[in-house]
Image (spheres, rainbow, N blue to C red):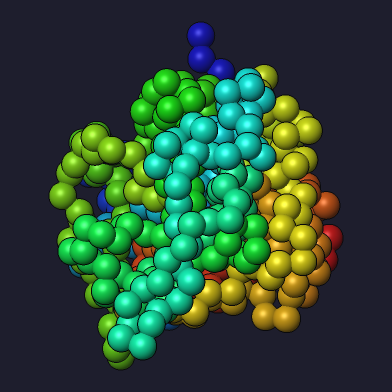
Amino acid sequence: MTGPITRRDALLRTAALASAGMIPAAALPLAAAPLDKPGRHEEIDRALQATVAAREIPGVVAMAANEQSVLYEGAFGFRDMATASRMSIDTIFRIASMVKLLTTVAALQLVERGKLKLDEPAGDIDPTLASVEVLAGFDAKGVPQLRPAQKPVTLRNLLTHTSGFSYLLWDQNVVRYLKFARGNPALPPMPLMFEPGTKWAYGGSLDRVGRMVEIAGGQNLDRYFSDHITGPLGMNDTGFSLNEKQRARQARLHVRDANGKLVPRPLEKPDVPKVFSGGGGIYSTAPDYLTLLQALLDGGSFRGTTILRPETVASMSANQIGNLEAGILRTTNPALSNDVDFFPGVHLRWGLGHMINLDPVPGGRKAGSLTWAGLFNTYYWIDPTMRIAGVIMMQILPFADRQALKAYRQFEREICHALGKT
């Protein structure tokens, strides 16, 4: 016997019928689950719909929840502006670096099981991390100067982006190094940009963590996620590859040209990867990802399924980097990313898996909230004080797109206002 159909079930079924061509896409309801105060969800609907109507963004899915239940869900605009295929709650997105949270959870599960340790050399697990070198600078001819690291890289360094691994997209020293090192077998593919633990730099640390999970967990990362995180939580639309039905629900990437116009790009070719990245390359939906956030909001459990112990989840939201500043990125490629400073004037730190704002954000989240994002303008936050988690997904380049951030901030403010907790 089946149970009663919930509002969310009805929305998902309607979206599925629309994507199958059984009802007109234009008939999709642009509605949201009720909030505590009458009329508040309509205000959020109108705010997000307005950004789409103004062609500031092609389409968006936004959701918010407490530990037990979804408080808001809304889908607006188009998956694909070229075909006018409409967004639905179950739209599939490329969430890029938002996989880093899954990789962090996986690593911390293995810490709980005694298979990984936060503060022992990562090279004890992955030998490629045993003899890393640090970029000391460049000589007068631009030749990189390397020296052995003075101390080992640890799992804690990798999870907090204090390892020294830095991304090409936001580090001129990496640009300069790779320009010289490419094709030179005498130089490592990627040295550390600084001594472990001395600075914060966003980079490929979680790719290394993903490999450590595979070694310590005895499975490739895709299977590990499925067996230990996404499967138990029912996140059935989250993975490194898509089946045919999922691909039919995928949002298309839209790129903003020099005049600010959004131009749709073709979907990437179907691919079943053999190598899995702990730092990017995954697909998901807003409902799936929100389920993960709800589990973390509730101390590591969701509806009877436990993925982490409460004390482990608490460590994820604690500042792990002391007085090091985090979260501000200067682009080296404006076509892929704008400069990133999500909260100007707010002190930012890093926990295990999340960026932490030490100060409250006016009109929005409280101090101690947790957040991060994906390259194609997908974002999440968890506010432990307000007991709220939110996710908003778009498919736009460049990252930190101003109009995408405007929609994100407006959604956050409206959610906080609707809950009466600003």
Picture quarter containing residue 266? bottom left
Report whether 414 appears left or right of 130. right
Residue 406 picture location, percent across and down: 55, 76
Q: Is residue 205 visible?
A: yes
Q: Nearer the viewer, residue 160 or 55?
A: 160
User: Which is more toward the observer, 103 or 205?
Assistant: 205
Kindly give the residue lying farthest to the bottom in the view shown.
Answer: 259
Quadrant (top left, top right, bottom left, bottom right) of the C terminus: bottom right
Q: Could you tell me which residue is drawn at 53 percent across and 56 percent down?
A: 149
Quick check: 15 left or right of 125? left
- Considering every residue shown, the one lying at the far top of the view is 1
The x and y percentages for residue 285 are 44, 45
Decide: is 248 above or below 4: below
Q: Give the percent coordinates (x, y) of residue 174.
A: 39, 71
- Indicate whether 108 appears above or below 82: above
Tell me what residue is drawn at x 66 percent, y 75 percent.
343
State whether residue 356 appears in this view.
no
Q: Quadrant of residue 363?
A: bottom right
State the residue at coordinates (38%, 82%).
139
Q: Quadrant of residue 120?
A: top right
At 83% from the left edge and 52% from the top edge, which residue is drawn? 385
Vertically, is 402 above or below 37? Answer: below
Residue 378: x, y in percent? Answer: 47, 59
Which of 212/50 is in front? 212
